[in-house]
Amino acid sequence: RVQNSHLKTITETCFDWCITDQKVAAVASSMHNLYLLGRKDKWIHEELLQLIDANYENGSAALKAKSRHVIKWINRDRKKEAKSAVNK
């Protein structure tokens, strides 16, 4: 079983890899992992969106594509949450 302390370390490492000079694959994987972690802790999605917004213009084509996917996934999740809140 993954402990909360492990999740915290993974989250911090992924954010570090997104903001430091890393290979595109490492950054793209970190963004994907942060999206998945953010499904449990919503603050991660907020930080990830800010990070994407700040770095989008200077990113490679691959990072821009991954950014668009992540944004789409987060927006889809938000719509589902809003819909389920209305149905309660």
Image (cartoon, helix red, strand yellow):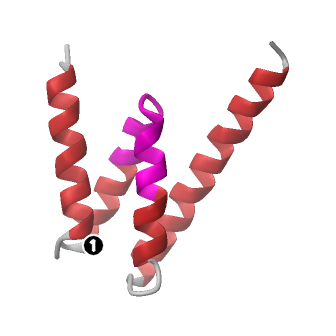
Q: Secondary structure at mark 1?
A: helix
Question: Does the magenta stretch mainly form a helix, a strand or a loop?
Answer: helix
Return the residue found at the far right: 87
Is 81 in front, or is 64?
81
Asked whether residue 78 is drawn in magenta, I would say: no
Asked whether residue 46 is drawn in magenta, I would say: yes
Percent x, y for residue 86? 83, 23
Q: From the viewer's perspective, is 85 left or right of 32?
A: right
Residue drawn at point x = 15 percent, y = 26 percent:
5
Image quadrant in which the N terminus is located: top left
Residue drawn at point x = 19 percent, y = 59 percent:
16
Where is 59 relative to 34, above or below?
Answer: below
Residue drawn at point x = 47 percent, y = 75 percent:
64
Image quadrant in which the C terminus is located: top right
Q: From the viewer's perspective, is 55 left or right of 73?
A: left
Identity, as a three-letter code, of the amino acid under mark 1: Val
Pointer 1 local density, CA inside 10 Å: few below 14, some 14–19, many at least 20: some
| Residue carrying label 1 | 24
Where is 71 relative to 12, above or below?
Answer: below
Percent x, y for residue 23? 20, 73
Where is 84 relative to 13, above or below?
Answer: above
**Magenta-highlighted residues:** 33-48
Percent x, y for residue 11? 25, 43
